[in-house]
């Protein structure tokens, strides 16, 4: 089976967004450019970590390579909803980040969930016939992927929007930190009583 690489270098728009009400949201990365629209699904924690790691990558690029970084935007940037139709191309299993010094751009690669990630791993399986030089942490080359190349300014705008999207969900319980549903929740800090 052939794999697809959806490359946007650079995209007209690259955002994180959601579909659905709080508590039932599905998170997406969406890239648009050249008449194409690609949406890939991922977990909320992946969006949060992506924003955090992009911030670290920009700081490291500035420290090591002297890249001039834009200030964090003070005004709200792109708050538009995801472009429609939101058709999931694949579910993201692995996210990769790199900084291209030659073009002073950030490269983000979202790689589909592989068969090994989709199956439940058995810890007691002893398979001595497996190749020793295979690295199980390396993503498979025949998996679908979304690759975008962003300027530091576009990366900053992506980070700010991703953080807004993650924080726009259900508020956390002040005692246990779990999300509060409109009907309340069973708080472990109150021995299971509704809050």
Image (cartoon, rainbow, N blue to C red):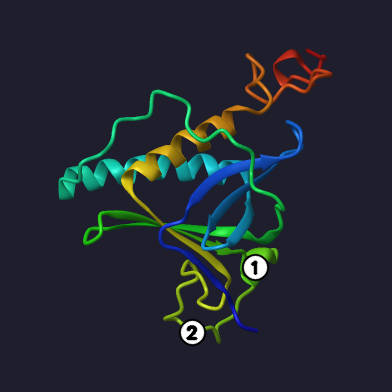
Q: Residue at x 21, y 62 (%)?
A: 102
Q: Dividing the picture into quarters, in which one does residue 164 lie? A: top right
Quadrant assignment, res 176: top right
Counting other residues with Cα less than 10 Å from the Cα at mark 1, is it few (<14), some (14-19), or many (20 or more)? Answer: few
Q: Which structural element holds mark 2? A: loop
Q: Quadrant of the C terminus?
A: top right
| Residue 34 percent location from the top left of the image | 52, 63
Image quarter of the N terminus: bottom right
The residue that label 2 is drawn on is: 131
> Measuring 61% from the left and 82% from the top, which residue is drawn there?
2
**Foreground disc of the pair 2, 1:** 2
In screen coordinates, is 49 left or right of 28? left
Residue 161 rendering spot, x and y as whole percentages: 50, 35
- Residue 96, numbered label: none
Q: Which residue is mark 1?
A: 124
Taking the spot 57% from the left edge, 42% from the top edge, the residue there is 45
**Considering depth in this image, is 146 or 194 the residue closer to the camera?**
146
Circle 1 sits in a helix, a strand or a loop, which is it?
A: loop
Q: Earlier in the sequence, mark 2 or mark 1?
A: 1
Q: Position of residue 190 (x, y in %)?
A: 74, 13
Q: For mark 2, does the 10 Å Cα neighbourhood hold few (<14), some (14 to 19), or many (20 or more) residues?
A: few
């Amino acid at each position: 089976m052939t794999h697809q690489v959806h490359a946007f270098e650079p995209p007209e728009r690259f955002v994180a967004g959601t579909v659905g009400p709080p508590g039932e949201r599905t998170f997406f990365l969406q890239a648009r450019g050249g008449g194409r629209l690609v949406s890939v699904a991922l977990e909320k924690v992946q969006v949060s970590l992506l924003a955090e790691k992009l911030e670290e990558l920009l700081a490291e690029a500035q420290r090591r390579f002297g890249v001039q970084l834009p200030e964090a935007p003070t005004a709200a940037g792109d708050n538009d909803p995801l472009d429609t139709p939101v058709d999931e191309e694949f579910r993201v299993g692995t996210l990769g980040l790199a900084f291209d010094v030659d073009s002073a751009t950030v490269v983000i690669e979202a790689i589909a969930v592989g068969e090994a990630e989709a199956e439940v791993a058995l810890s007691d399986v002893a398979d001595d016939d497996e190749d020793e030089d295979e690295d199980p942490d390396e993503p498979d080359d025949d998996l679908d992927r979304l690759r975008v190349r962003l300027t530091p300014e576009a990366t900053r705008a992506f980070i700010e929007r991703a953080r807004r999207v993650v924080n726009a969900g259900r508020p956390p319980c002040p005692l246990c930190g779990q999300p509060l549903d409109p009907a309340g929740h069973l708080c472990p800090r109150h021995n299971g009583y509704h809050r």
